[in-house]
Amino acid sequence: MARFYTKSWFPYILPFLLCFALAQTANYLPKWALHISSAKILIGGGLIWAWRHKFSDDLSAQLTKKQILLSILFGMLGFTLWFTSQHFKLISIPPSNMPAQWPIALQVVVTTVLIAGSTVIMPIISELFWRSFILRYLIVQDFKSIPLGEFQLFSFLGVIFLAAIPSEYVVAVAAVCAIQNILIIWQKNLRCCIVASVVTNILLALYLLSNNYQLM
């Protein structure tokens, strides 16, 4: 019997679960939240880079000009859903937790790491986990035997439920997850979802910074 770490799903699960566990740990250790969040980005990024060959099939499809534009529009829609959820107080984003006593240089470095993580590394980790793995795994356990973007209602709703329920931002996460599911089912290209997620997170990071909210 093959060891669990040799299974095809392992590189999809471990980076995401480690990042999720570290994010939850940061919530319970607010004094160490920025340290833990920075470690989360570095560890997640390192694992994705180490296993990059495992995801070559998922990322092999090139983006057309139409898909790039569509992905940007979906990303802008994703940010709009976050903004609307915050505006109508459906979610509550905490204020910035950057210590004022830290040197400016250190604040800039940590902020840069967190933004790079949220706008580059986490979109890749999240889309590989939710849209490539879970969305297909809920249809059939041999998830690589079916193409990206295969539609099944149970799988579609299951991903939204699993993504939103553990989150502090249930409404926003559920709404963005739904449009990301639609995008992968429509375009069958994981790069579309990654680009959309990158756009959403860039706009969200700028919004959080400009309003002195905590970076995610």
Image (spheres, rainbow, N blue to C red):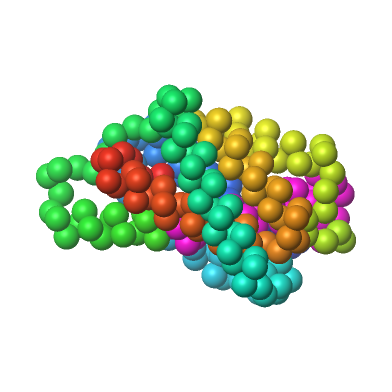
Q: Position of residue 216 (x, y in %)?
A: 41, 44
| Residue under the image location 82 percent in, 53 percent down | 150
Q: Closer to the camera, 202 or 18? A: 202
Q: Closer to the camera, 67 or 26? A: 67
Q: Position of residue 59 (x, y in %)?
A: 67, 70
Q: Left of 151 or right of it: where is 86?
A: left
Q: Left of 118 or right of it: where is 151?
A: right
Residue 194: name its quadrant: bottom right
| Residue under the image location 52 percent in, 39 percent down | 81
| Residue under the image location 35 percent in, 46 percent down | 207
Q: Position of residue 120 (x, y in %)?
A: 47, 61
Q: Closer to the camera, 90 or 25? A: 90
| Residue under the image location 74 percent in, 36 percent down | 157
| Main secondary-structure element of the magenta-colored stretch | helix
Q: Closer to the camera, 27 or 168? A: 168
What is the quadrant of the N terminus in the image? bottom right
- Is 159 rendered above or below residue 141? above
- Is 154 rendered above or below residue 151? above
Q: Left of 56 or right of it: where is 36?
A: left
Residue 176: name its quadrant: top right
Q: Position of residue 179 (x, y in %)?
A: 64, 45
In the image, the segment drawn in magenta is 117-144
Q: Would residue 209 be seen by someone viewing this image from the given angle?
A: yes
